[in-house]
Image (cartoon, grey):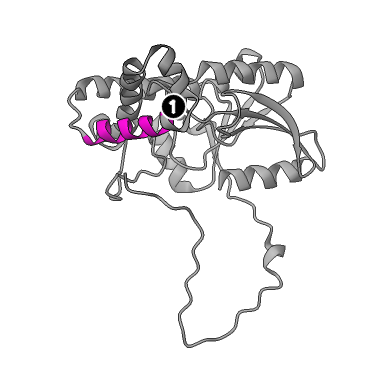
Amino acid sequence: GSEVYTYNLSKELSKRHEVIVFYRVANPQKEEYATEWGEYDGLRVFTINNTFRECLSFELIYKNDIIAEKFGTFLDEVRPDVVHFGHVTCLSTSCIAEARKREIPVVYTLHDFWLICQRGQFLKRDLSICHRQEDRECVKCLAYQMMVTEGRKRTSRILGGAHGDLLKRTLLWRYVLKMASVFYSNSKFLREEKAIKEIQKRTEYIKEMMEKVNIFIAPSHFMKEKYIEFGIPEKKIVYSDYGFDASLFREIIRRPSEKVCFGYIGTWILIS
C-alpha cells in the first residue's frame, strides 16, 4: 500500500516538481547495503540493498546507522527542499535525523501503526486486536524477532572462523540460520525483563525521532487519534484522506447476479 501511494504521489508531483525516490530493495545476490542510481517509470530513484542477513540485534530492525549514513550521503548529493517519508521500515528511523541535521523540513505520512507497533497493525500473533502499546504484550508479539537475532548471534559464534566465513556465502548458511531462528523462537523466552528493556528502548528512540518531524499526515481520523494518544502533538498531525485515480474504474460494468461476489484488497498477515 505505501509503495503504491508513494509511486502515485511521486508521479503526480513530478508534473510540477523534481522528485527523487529513495527506497530499499532486497536482493540476496547483491552486497548488503549496496546503493544504486536508476530510473523507474520516468522517476529518478536511488536504492539501497537490505536483506537483513547481517541483522544481529533487535535494534538493527528499526535503527540502522549504516543505512542512515548512506541516506545522509544521498541527501548531500540531491539537496532536496523537502523530505517526505512514506515509511522507514526496512530502512532506518534514524534517516529522519539525517534530514533534520541538514535543516531539511520533514513530512511523514502514517500508513499504518508501525511507529507504535513493530508488527504495524495492532494485531497480536493470534490475530486478536491490540488496543494500545504495552511493553509486556509487545514482548509476546515480538519474541520471534528478538529470538531470531539471538539465534543468529549464537549460531555465528558456533560457526565462527574460516569455516563460518565460507558458510555465510552458501545456501547452507541461510538454512542453518533459519533452523536456529525456529529453534530459539519456539523455546521459552526466559529473559523477559531484558526484552522489555529492548521494547522500551525502541519506543523511546522512535519518540525522539518523531519529535524531529515537522508535520505528520494521517489518512484516517482513527489513525490520527491513535498517534496523538501515543504522543504526537495535535498541532503536528493533520488528517488527509488518500487520493485515488477513479478513472481506472470507469470502464468497469457491474452485472446483476444471484451469487454474492466478494472482492478483497489488502495484504496477508501470517500467524508466527
Considering depth in this image, is 57 or 267 the residue closer to the camera? 57
Question: Looking at the picture, how far across and down is residue 177, in whole percent?
Answer: 37, 29
In the displayed structure, 56 sits above or below 256; it is above
* Camera-nearest residue between 41 and 121: 41
SS category of the residue bearing label 1? helix
**Residue 189 in the image: above or below residue 71:** below
From where the camera sits, is residue 219 visible? yes
Looking at numbered disc 1 in the image, what kind of residue is underneath it?
Ile
- Location of residue 153 in the rendering, given as x and y in whole percent from the top left corner: 34, 19
Residue at the image position 55 percent from the left and 32 percent from the top: 28
Split into 4 quadrants, where in the image is the C terminus?
top left
In which quarter of the view is residue 30 placed? Answer: top right
Instruction: Identify the residue at image location x=43%, y=47%.
Output: 222
Residue 134 appears in view: no
Q: Locate residue 146: give its quadrant.
A: top left
Q: Is residue 239 magenta?
A: no
At x 56%, y 24%, the residue is 32
Please name the residue shown 52% across and 86% down the image.
Answer: 257
Residue placed most toward the observer, 107 or 194: 194
Within the image, what quadrant is residue 35 found in? top right
Q: Position of residue 14 (x, y in %)?
A: 79, 40
**Residue 93 image point, x, y percent:** 50, 24
Question: Seen in the image, is 116 located left or right of residue 1?
Answer: left
Position of residue 166 relative to residue 186, above or below, is above
- The total number of labels drawn is 1
Residue span colored magenta = 173-186
